[in-house]
Amino acid sequence: MLQALSFKEILSAFLVMFAIIDITGSIPIFVSMRDKGTKIKPMQATGVALLLFVAFFIVGDQLLKLFGIDMPSFAVAGSVVLFILAFEMILGRDIIKNEPTSSGASIVPIAFPLIAGPGAITAFISLHAEYETVNIMIGLALNIVIDYFVLRYLDKITHWLGADIIYVLRKFFGVILLAMAVKLFVGNIMAVFHG
């Protein structure tokens, strides 16, 4: 267990998940929802998101085997999704459309798809091809804690950061995510062809 722990892997997994979840980029959405009278429950939203991530991580491998897909192939597919998400963040254009519903705002659209969206879940499962499970889970847990505090202290964070800083953070993590997508693609594409 201790041998599997790697600060580098934890940091990498954390950064990938932080960039994809993009909780800072979602702050304007949360503020808009709050201004419309929507009650946001931070504990419920982050709890459900965590359960979704863990459930897909546990069952995801069995689902892949059911369809005859190996982990490197899934990782390559996941890297393509990361490319798209990174371009969304960098260019400020929505390529993957999410259709939020009006009911249960803490669960939909906050827990899913704003925190545990299709891209984040795909990336999370894809990380299994690169990193040890314990490091991925720690990286996820750190993200969920940050997500909770952002939702819990939304007013203070919005006031403290300001729109310009939030914009810059979104672009910065978009570039980081793009670089990680390239790494994930290159690291697994040869295994796909040789497998």
Image: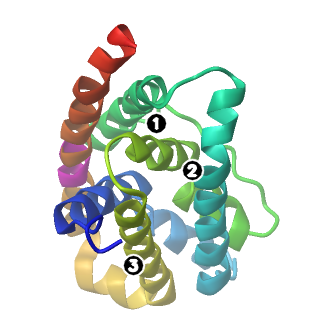
* Magenta highlight: main SS: helix
Spatial CA distance of label 1 from label 3 is: 24 Å
Q: Quadrant of the C terminus?
A: top left
Badges 2 and 3: C-beta atoms under 8 Å apart?
no
Under tag 2, what secondary structure? loop
Q: Local crowd at mark 2 within 10 Å, few (<14), some, or many (≥20)?
A: many
Q: Nearer the viewer, residue 51 or 24?
A: 51
**Which circle's residue, 1 or 3, is located before the other in the chain?**
1
Query: Which residue is rendered at x = 72% and y = 28% of the image?
Result: 66
Magenta stretch bounds: 171-175
Disc 1 or 2, which lies upstream in sequence? 1
Whether the magenta-drawn stretch holds residue 191 is answered as: no
**x then y, percent, for residue 128:** 42, 46
Residue corresponding to mark 3: 146
The numbered disc on residue 94 is 1
Kind of residue indicated by mark 3: Ile
Three-letter residue code for mark 1:
Asp
* Relative to 169, residue 97 above or below: above
- Residue sitting nearer the eye, 158 or 144: 144
Crowd around label 3: few <14 · some 14–19 · many ≥20 (10 Å) = some
Among numbered discs 2 and 3, the one appearing first in the sequence? 2
Per the model, the C-alpha gap separating discs 1 and 2 is 14 Å
Tell me residue 144's x, y (percent): 47, 74
Colour approach in the figure: rainbow
